[in-house]
Image (cartoon, rainbow, N blue to C red):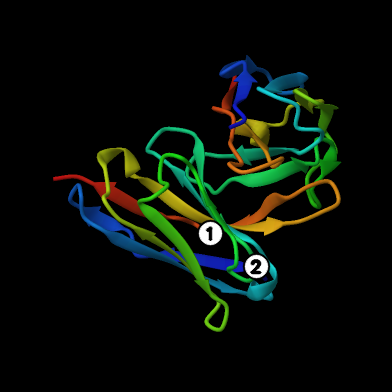
Amino acid sequence: QVLLVESGGGVVQPGRSLRLSCEASGFTFGSYTMHWVRQAPGKGLEWVALISYDGSNDFYADSVKGRFTISRDNSKNRLSLQMSSLRSEDTALYYCARERGTVRGPHFDDWGQGTLVTVSS
Amino acid sequence: DIQMTQSPSSLSASVGDRATITCRASQSIGRYLNWYQQKPGNVPKVLIYGASSLQSGVPSRFSGSGSGTDFTLTISSLQPEDFATYYCQHSYSTPYSFGQGTKLEIK
């Protein structure tokens, strides 16, 4: 079955960097657009970034543009999120999610369990 | 960017009741609207995609409707396991923003 496992979260000081990973299995990773979505403690869902199936296109939320970089290695079934210049407002549980494309539009049909990032001095 | 606004923010209802949650987009998104359910401590789960298509395995008491800017999620007869937070999300263009969520609580 589809499995997405995030890692790399932790406590980091403001202004520092952190790299998250998402290991995928149970499906043909290189055929799917992938996303990062985050959820601050006790808050709602916030879309963060997407990368196309082949890595040729990426898009970001305004709140992370210029600070975060999404990437993928299809040979290793791995999605990454490089986060720099971290701020306290980046504190959240970060999920990777698989996009399912349909004639009725894309949606996220599988999610990892998330990795927690805490930005604090 | 397209903004998504859900109402109400919270809803109190009883088992067996019919529950309706609405979602409004700041501009027309056709039918590129998805609904997710999230229970405390759990990962979000897609219920409805393309405004009205039921995700495989989701009970038929869940239904979605709407197009353009106004959308509705309806739960026809609430079951104990339906008390959760619900989010709408558009997938018309990036950023694929979510609504702020509707917390459905037991009365």
> Which residue position holds label 1?
A112
Please report, as a chain letter, where disc 1 is located: A
Q: Seen in the image, is B91 located left or right of residue A20?
A: right
Point 75% across, 27% down: residue: B28
SS at circle 2: loop
Could you tell me the amino acid type at mark 2? Tyr
Toward the viewer: B55 or B68?
B68
> Which residue position holds label 2?
A53
Answer whether residue B10 is visible to the viewer in this image.
Answer: yes
Is residue A2 depicted above or below A85 in this figure? below
Point 19% across, 45% down: residue: A120
Residue B8 location (% of width, % of height): 61, 15
Residue B88 location (% of width, % of height): 66, 33
Toward the viewer: B36 or A108?
A108
Residue A17 location (% of width, % of height): 26, 58
Point 78% across, 45% down: residue: B58
